[in-house]
Image: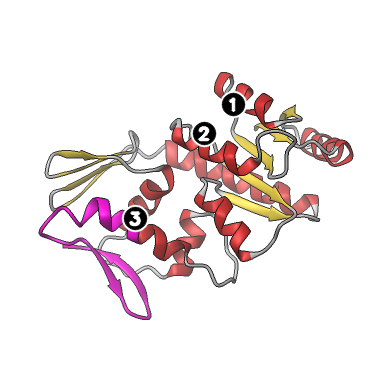
Amino acid sequence: MKLLIVEDEPNLLSILRKGFAENNNDVSVALDGTTALEMIYNYTFDVVVLDVMLPDINGIEICRRLRAAKNFVPILLLTALGTSENIVTGLNAGADDYLVKPFKFGELDARVNALNRRAHQDTEKVDTIIIGDLEINGKAKTVKRDGEPIVLTAKEFKLLYYLAKNTGRIVSRDQILDNVWDINFDMNTNVVDVYITYLRKKIDKPYKTKLIHTMKGLGYVIQL
């Protein structure tokens, strides 16, 4: 993998750089948010390991700027703030996963490898899913309904794509967290419900036929 580590703490940076390099990864580093953004805009990375607390632009803002620029490089946030609110903020900003400090390098390495595998699996999907007048292009990451383009964020698209792949099947909130956010954790978060609301406003609200349905106590399903 080609990795970018964004971390301003010298000792931790040294450990991460050495650990990933010993696992035959091509490792680049940035000590601040400005340098990180410059590198990501100019070079291709498989995964970015991003500290939240940086001396200039924090990790949350970096996520927001990259996703606004339609840059969907997988991002794993490193944070000392492990509360539910802080984790949800990071995920909503566009991060794909998070790890709370202190952590074991083995877990970080496994999570980074999982993000890389998922990203490559996604790029290999060349398919179009059609549900009524809704058309989803998995490779181009575009969505149309009744022939009209619908603009989605990266995470909105991933959620819609996951629901569409399971058309007619109920998926639980835990399944969505595991497959859309690439995480499996037990916390009282409403991030799934929030993103379902975002999707409904764009996919369903302007149209007579509603496609996204809530199955009380079970989860969600997309179907005609």
Task: Return the residue found at the far right.
Answer: 11
Q: Distance of mark 1 from mark 2, alpha carbons?
A: 9 Å
Residue 80: mark: none
Query: The N terminus is located in which quarter?
Result: top right
Between tags 1 and 2, which lies in front? 2
Element type at marker 1?
Answer: helix
In magenta stretch: residue 198: yes
The spot of residue 178 in percent (x, y) is: 51, 61
Q: How is the image coloured?
A: secondary structure
- The residue lying at 86 percent from left, 40 percent from top is 15
Q: Secondary structure at mark 2?
A: helix
Residue located beneath label 1 in the image: 40
C-alpha separation, residue under disc 2 versus residue under disc 3: 20 Å
Residue furthest to the bottom in view is 217
Q: Are marks 2 and 3 in contact (CB under 8 Å)?
A: no
Q: Identify which residue, 196 or 53, lies in the foreground.
A: 53
At 60% from the left and 29% from the top, the residue drawn is 45
Asked if 116 appears above or below 89 in the picture, the reply is above
Q: Which residue range is magenta in the image? A: 197-224
Q: Quadrant of the C terminus?
A: bottom left
Q: CA distance from mark 3 to mark 1?
A: 28 Å
Q: Percent from the top left, x then y, of residue 42? A: 57, 18
- Secondary element at image label 3: helix
Residue at horizontal 33 percent and vertical 43 percent from the top: 152
What amino acid type is highlighted by mark number 2? Leu
Of callouts 2 and 3, which one flags the residue occurring earlier in the amino acid sequence?
Answer: 2
Residue at image mark 3: 198
Q: Residues within 10 Å of mark 3 (few under 14, many from 20)?
A: some
Whether residue 58 appears in magenta in the rendering, the answer is: no
Residue 66 numbered mark, or none: 2
